Amino acid sequence: MRYLPLSADDRAEMLDKIGEKNIDDLFVDVPKYALLKGLVDLPLHMTEMEVEQNFSAFSSRNVAAGDVPFFVGAGAYRHHVPSSVDYQIQRGEFLTAYTPYQPEISQGTLQTLYEFQSQVAQITGMDVANASMYDGSTGCGEAALMARRITRKKRIIVSGNLHPHYIEVVKSATKFADDVVVVNDPAINQAENLLAQVDETTSCVIVQNPDFFGNINDFTALAHALHEQKMLLVVVTTEIVALGAIKSPGEMGADIVVGEGQSIGNGLNYGGPYVGLFATRQKYVRQMPGRLCGETTDAEGKRGFVLTLSTREQHIRREKATSNICTNAGLCTLAFTIHMSLLGEKGYRHLAKLNHAGAVKMADKLRAIDGVEILNATFFNEFTVRLNKDAAAVVEELVDRDIIAGVPVSRLYPDRPELANHLIIAVTETTSEDDMDIMTKELKEVLK
Amino acid sequence: MTIYYSEDHEWISVDGNVGTVGITNYAQNALGDIVFVEVPEVGDDFAKGDEVAVVESVKAASEIYSPVGGKITETNGELEDNAALVNSSPDGDGWFFKINISDSGELEGLMDADGYKTFIAGLE
Amino acid sequence: MMNNQGRPTNNNAASDAQITGYKSYTGSRGLEQEELLIYEIGDTQRTGVDLPEVEDFKSCLGDVERDQEIGLAGLSEPEAMRHYTRLSRKNYAIDMGLYPLGSCTMKHNPRLNEKMARLPGLGDIHPMQPLSTVQGALDLIDTLAHWLKTLTGMPAVAMSPKAGAHGELCGLMAIRTALEAKGDGRSIVLAPESAHGTNPATAALCGYKVVSIPATSEGRVDLAAMKDAMGPEIAAIMVTNPNTCGLFEREIVEMADAIHAVGGYFYCDGANFNAIVGKVRPGDLGVDAMHINLHKTFSTPHGGGGPGAGPVVLSEALAPYAPIPYVVAGEEEFNMVEHDVEGGESFGRMTAFHGQMGMFVRALSYMMSHGADGLARVAEDSVLNANYVLASLKDVMSASYEGPCMHEALFDDHFLKDTGVSTLDFAKAMIDEGYHPMTMYFPLVVHGAMLVEPTESESKQSVDQFIEMMRHLVKAAKGGEVERFSGAPYNAPLKRLDETGAARNPKLRWED
């Protein structure tokens, strides 16, 4: 019981002070039948060594991304995170602190949140960013709700090239708010005529850039046309490194930008915890969900930071809050901020270039294989190919050859046989040329 | 010009058909430092008792209910940049909006200055 | 050569100034160092990361290449390390001392859990890699699910919600979907006035009107008032148990019966599960759905405000409506169901991918370390520590309700009446004494609330020191030392901050 400091003597002495004989006397308000007489049917306590053995066993039955040529993206990306990031986030002062409700003794967390908000606003090209959402997908659901609050309209148009999980989250987030969610069919490398679908009841259009299939789009004209009709453009980015190479959603005229920030500072972690980026225009800040950190001064005039505009939040506004969100992705935002501070403008731009160069090289290698067709005209570090065989089966065959080749589109669209041969392939700075060559060689054999 | 008061601590100063609405000194005191006021849109219609505005301090938010029904004709743009006016001048420069009163009979349920004074004395 | 230069080594202060000190030129105070923003330290040309050169290649970005500078500040690695280390030292943390934030369960965060989460086979796996390559991960999720179901006595659990409030949303969406499946369109959710703000906010997100149920003078839900409010329009009750006043709802079973009698569901807010883990199973109390904050009861780190994780246990009646995805243990292998099965009734997906795996690992590591025996002791020791605080302070502070309490003790500000010291002032004075304040002004049902949750992580010595400190402060407040409180904190990195100014003129990002 290494985590429990009270000794038997302590407990007896404390019970005596309280004036009770038995620990169960303190549970007197529990209905008698419900207070367990014995222990629940689970194993007894374990030593550190035993716990480690158990987890080594879990771990060894998985294939770690770093151990094989690895090309999986589709919303989460394997990037290299500097060692100092993981060291810093494990400092007890960051790791074991609560939400910074007492600003005088939380300036560490608050100042990093302010730096985080600044970085996110800059990268997305927006005026303000919040202190993070759970992840990109839940941020996307919140964006849809926010657009309704601003426009007081209920029809949401969703691009068919938005990550399918994000589409599903938007649907469930708005499910009981009687919003109408119109979702397009996937359109790999085809222009979607989103504007034709809006009507006077439309609140927003949600698009992704680079989109789920890897295409890069310019939404400037769309934003312009939507604004003329007082509708909002929501732009989602699931690979935040891309914004080091392409124009920001803000430059294109987005009103709300949602991002998955996992790529910077955070590992794959089998899907979470990640960090949702959320940015908007100054004029909409009071309709924003989530926490915000702001600059102020203390009683002596020294600069300091506090959580602010809290009246939007559930603990004050209760049923009228902008969102029910309470926690943010605290420690993941810290990892993001430290990694981004280490990169700086120069490193971030260079990292983006490196990712893109790798993907271009990989696409060129694959293009030479019979049975592989690259579908993208434009892409950043991820693109979609059509194979001459079922993509899920090909991926399984390549697993047997110790390669994890990508994401078969059928895993997300099982009901669309026309997409059965499609595979999404991602390349990052962690992908070596050897990895690419092994993949190319083995894929060629599998497709024969 | 007559001033009426509601039990929700709003005042309405009536000039002909138009009422100017704000919150009382008692209300601004209870809320503390006001940081933001959300006023209605000009042209919007409200019934008596509808939520028409929101006033926020750092740690509290409070709805303002329309003391009468009618159409909003003007809002106090000054509050956008300077919500502190509600603290410094609740019954003057800190007014919220003007409303075209649709039924002056609704004023009858409100209190006059003396009545309101007695009302808040009872709350202490 | 021998060192023959002596130097002063005693600490005899020559004057008062040498004791009280001088204001420094830098603004720093010894180890308490001032720190600028990254934008004031670094610039766009500096970087702390070495990346390989990029060979020439033909861009496929189309015509939207970024051509504007972003303005990101970069730091070299030593600068970054120093910057964030200095900032870290401006935070209070569990590792530094007792963190009595009621309702937050600030317990020790074992580092073993961090180590387990970083095993390559757990930290470096992708949510979309083939299921055949993540069988250990699926087994882990299934194992954690088994522990949660066993501890709560519930038949099912939805693992994907990302935090407590997200779990509440999951539970209420399952309830609304279950009702709609029966063609039952109810409109009201009942929640006690002492509820966390997330409860009414969540109910509103699900399209429900929230009706508040008052508390009794004993700090519990007024059962008679709840029964009066019952009817065919009531979809659910949302009750926190143990409740936010730190008390067990004695009439919980009657509440469950009352809501079931009108065909509604019982949502239990499991924020305070720590007090009863291993001792009481919510499933035995008539609960239909309850979220579990892994970051509270099962010690995944709070990390300055997240990430959390909020799996939701569900009754048989609600299980069919649970969100996707979920893990299924087959005869030979584990499977992950990512799309609703044919004829399925899942309400949909709450998040991309599968939930907070990194938190699952940490929570399971914590649970296995404690085992069935250790978890019951977690509940017992947390309740014991809280009652010990209550017993040791109730003669000088005003306890809001009669004991025994569960894992947190609630006081109100009656004992400060006429002292000129407010709950806020009292809390800020605790900072000067080296403690994080308790939760203040929550729950809303008592005046000037102070909610103290010591947790089971504290030794008797630590709790005794806390009690002694509190007794000193109470004595000072009652003794008229108003300034000790009104200007506090005096010894923190900053004095009180101007929150009004921050909200009136929001400055939310760096700008040149």
Image (cartoon, grey):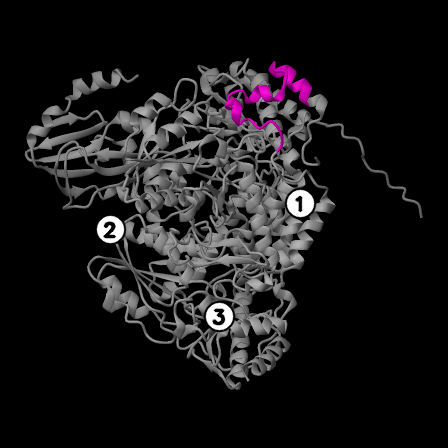
Looking at the image, tell me whether mark 3 or mark 2 is earlier in sequence order: 2
Pick the front one: C280 or C483: C280
Q: Is residue C100 left or right of residue B15?
A: right
Quarter the N terminus of chain A occupies: top right
- Secondary structure state at the residue bearing disc 3: strand
Residue A204 quadrant: bottom left
Marks 3 and 2 on same chain: yes
A23 in magenta: yes
Instruction: Name the kind of residue labelled 1 in the image.
Output: Arg
Q: Are marks 1 and 2 in contact (CB under 8 Å)?
A: no
A147 in magenta: no
Image spot of residue A29 (x, y percent): 50, 21
Which chain letter goes with mark 1? Answer: C
Q: Is residue C428 visible?
A: yes
Residue labelled with disc 3: A408
The mark found on residue C111 in the picture is 1
Instruction: Name the kind of residue labelled 3 in the image.
Output: Pro
The magenta-colored residue range is A11-39
- Secondary structure state at the residue bearing disc 2: loop
Instruction: Name the kind of residue labelled 2 in the image.
Output: Arg
Residue at x 45%, y 57% (from the top left corner):
C352
Marks 1 and 2 on same chain: no
Image spot of residue C71 (x, y percent): 47, 62
Pick the front one: A431 or B81: A431
Spatial CA span between label 1 and label 2: 48 Å
Which chain letter goes with mark 3? Answer: A
Residue C6 quadrant: top right
Residue labelled with disc 2: A152
Image spot of residue A341 (x, y percent): 55, 58
Q: Is residue B60 left or right of residue A109?
A: left
